[in-house]
Amino acid sequence: MRFKVHMPKHLSPVFSAELTQAQLRFKEGQIQQSWTHLERAHIVGQPYPYAHSLVHWKMLIFGFRTKNSKEIMGQVPRLLVGGVKSFVGEIPEGNTGGANVPPLKRMPIPEDLYQIIHAKEERRTARRT
């Protein structure tokens, strides 16, 4: 089993950009767009313990700011165990991380993120053949 601790360099800017866009959209009052960026950050960051936990923290804060008790209650357990699940590689690929979806449900990854996430893997595989 290979533990994923650090996010690959090619994903860090994507992850950071999604968090930045979430913050900007929230400040502009574009609440749904802000949430969408948090979900996208979750998809990118969920295999990596620190990033995964950070997104759930941001989602918890989002829940408080929007006075969404369902989101608050849903994020607390995700925040407590999400990073641990990432560390041992037990994450459902594509899961958007919100309280509106089961924590262990695999979901399709948006095509643009799929291409970015799997770009390095595909290049590695091509070099081996």
Image: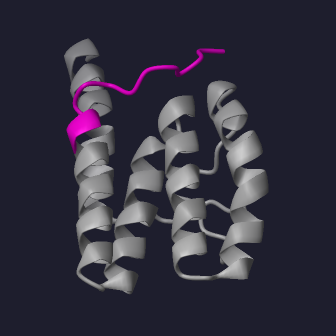
Whether residue 125 is visible to the viewer of this picture, yes or no, is: yes
Please indicate whether residue 99 sits to the left or right of residue 40 in the image: right
Q: Indicate whether 102 appears above or below 33.
A: above
Point out the stretch of residues depicted in magenta: 1-13
Which of the 4 image quarters holds residue 35? Answer: bottom left
In the depicted view, which residue is nearer to us: 86 or 20? Answer: 20
Q: Residue 74, relative to residue 127: is it above or below?
A: below
Query: For the image shown, how many numbered marks are present on the structure?
Result: 0
Residue 105 locus on image (x, y percent)? 69, 62
Q: Locate residue 21: give its quadrant.
A: bottom left
| Residue 36, picture quadrant | bottom left
**Closer-to-camera residue (105/77):** 77
Q: Is the magenta stretch mostly helix, strand or loop?
A: loop
Compared across the picture, whether 101 is left or right of 16 comes to right
Q: Which residue is drawn at the image coordinates 32% and 29% (left, top)?
A: 121
x, y percentage for residue 25? 26, 74
Give me the residue at 21% from left, 27% from top: 123
- Image quadrant occupied by the C terminus: top left
Q: Which residue is located at x 77 percent, y 69 percent?
A: 73
Q: Which residue is drawn at 32% across and 25% down?
A: 8
Residue 10 in magenta stretch: yes
Pick the quarter of the image with the N terminus: top right
Above or below 34: residue 44: above
Q: Check if residue 28 falls in the magenta segment.
A: no
Rendered image coloring scheme: one colour
Q: Where is residue 102 in the image (x, y as percent from the top left)?
A: 73, 68
Residue 46, visible in the rendered structure: no
